[in-house]
Amino acid sequence: MRIADFELERYFARWEFAVRHLLCASDVEGWPMADLLALADDETAALWRDLRLGYTESTGHPLLRREIAALYLTAEADDVLVTVGAEEGIFALVSVLLGLGDHAIVTWPGYQSLYEVARAAGVEVTLHELREVDGWAIDLDELRRQVTPRTRLIVVNAPHNPTGMLPDRVTFQAIVAIAAEAGATLLSDEVYRYLEHDEADRLPAGVDAGPHVVSLGVMSKSFAMAGLRIGWLATRDRSILDRVARMKDYTTICSSAPSEILALIGLRARERVLARSRSIVHGNLTALDGFFDRWPGVLSWVRPRGGSIGFPRLRADLDADRFSAELVEAEGVLLLPGSRFGHPGNHVRIGFGRTDLPEAVAGLERHLARVVRD
Ligand SMILES: Cc1ncc(COP(=O)(O)O)c(C=O)c1O
């Protein structure tokens, strides 16, 4: 299989562990192991203590699948398949659903694997472009026009990476309907779900919206446990999960035994886990409001409605690639230039899920003070 480089991941491979401050990470500050274990109930504490390091069930630990299903209104444990990160879910789902001659529509800019895996399989991919002038909104009329008789998959990610876009319920239901009318599966990438900046804006989960919709979830973002590498697909179309399970035999076979139990502990304590994430993200977002107020005309953004990232634009004389390279050199602060999404608009991705955000922003402001001329 030949597949284009994953530009964002290559960038992180180069920089993530070499800089002082990651001001573009999409995950929330990871849980300390001891703090997570302290949340275990009697059953999960015993599961952890008595854990044997053998292979695990390919579809995922039954208790974990049950706990994931409890996140949704209509799902049962058998409607859930555990994957290694959300990334394996994307790879396996797209691989089994699509082949040569099929057509897919994917929101863009976005997380590259959501369209690149399909392209590598010979699928014709139409990018549904989100535009800053529209507040990064999904254009339902354009989406309808993009559907063809060969459309098998529509992919929507909300809250959205990198813009923080979050459609309203009416728009989401319309997307669900467009996919149903097209006879297509809708992949609803919900890895930033629960990080809505106004909880009233939370969308229904895809799995609850219709049997042709697949929810993609993960422990990495809102649950702040990226190192577990536990993700999942949830859909009431069990034939899809069965096909994905057969593909998984060629990728990872099953998940890590310790990670499954730790994910179970985290999900059972989800109210505390999510409260911590929201407190970090909302505190940082308020700090960023102040930051943008201090640099009017230099950096501006469509304020994210959900998630832990946003996609501000730099003033035209400050080239995003050059600015990011000089910033990391001068201050050890990492931003992610929009070019890594193949986006030409002089944007950078900024992440606000980490607790060192005040120091990172201080470094960014020192650099701005040096390079900005009024
Ligand atoms: C929208 C989106 N989907 C999926 C993923 C993959 O998640 P994970 O790295 O936990 O597998 C990411 C990671 O950044 C993402 O932003």
Image: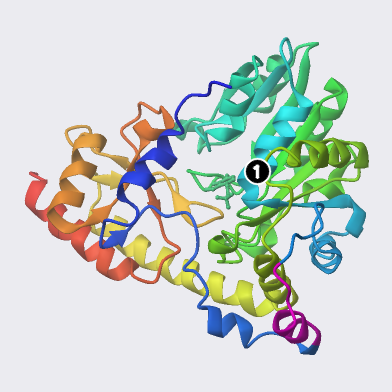
**Picture quadrant where residue 200 is located:** bottom right
Give the residue at x 40% y 28%. 343
Q: Nearer the viewer, residue 226 or 130?
A: 226
Whether the residue carrying mark 1 lies under 8 Å from ligand 1 is answered with yes
Q: Residues within 10 Å of mark 1 (few under 14, many from 20)?
A: many
Q: Amino acid at mark 1?
A: Glu
Q: Is residue 167 visible?
A: no
Q: Mark 1 — residue?
A: 88
Which stretch appears magenta?
43-53
* Quadrant of the rendering where the N terminus is positioned: top right
Query: Does the magenta run of residues contain 52?
Result: yes
Q: Position of residue 313 (x, y in %)?
A: 33, 40
Judge left or right: residue 225 versus residue 310. Answer: right
Q: Position of residue 207 (x, y in %)?
A: 83, 48
Q: Nearer the viewer, residue 332 or 305?
A: 332
Judge left or right: residue 371 versus residue 334. Answer: left
Give the residue at x 35% y 41%. 11
**Picture quadrant where residue 76 is located:** bottom right
Q: Secondary structure at mark 1?
A: helix
* Quadrant of the rendering where the C terminus is positioned: top left
Q: Position of residue 185 (x, y in %)?
A: 81, 31
Query: Does the magenta run of residues contain 225?
Result: no
Q: How is the structure coloured here?
A: rainbow
Give the residue at x 39% y 39%. 10
Dominant secondary-structure state across the stretch colored magenta: helix
Q: Give the mark count.
A: 1
User: 175 above or below 158?
Assistant: above
Give the residue at x 82% y 38%. 246
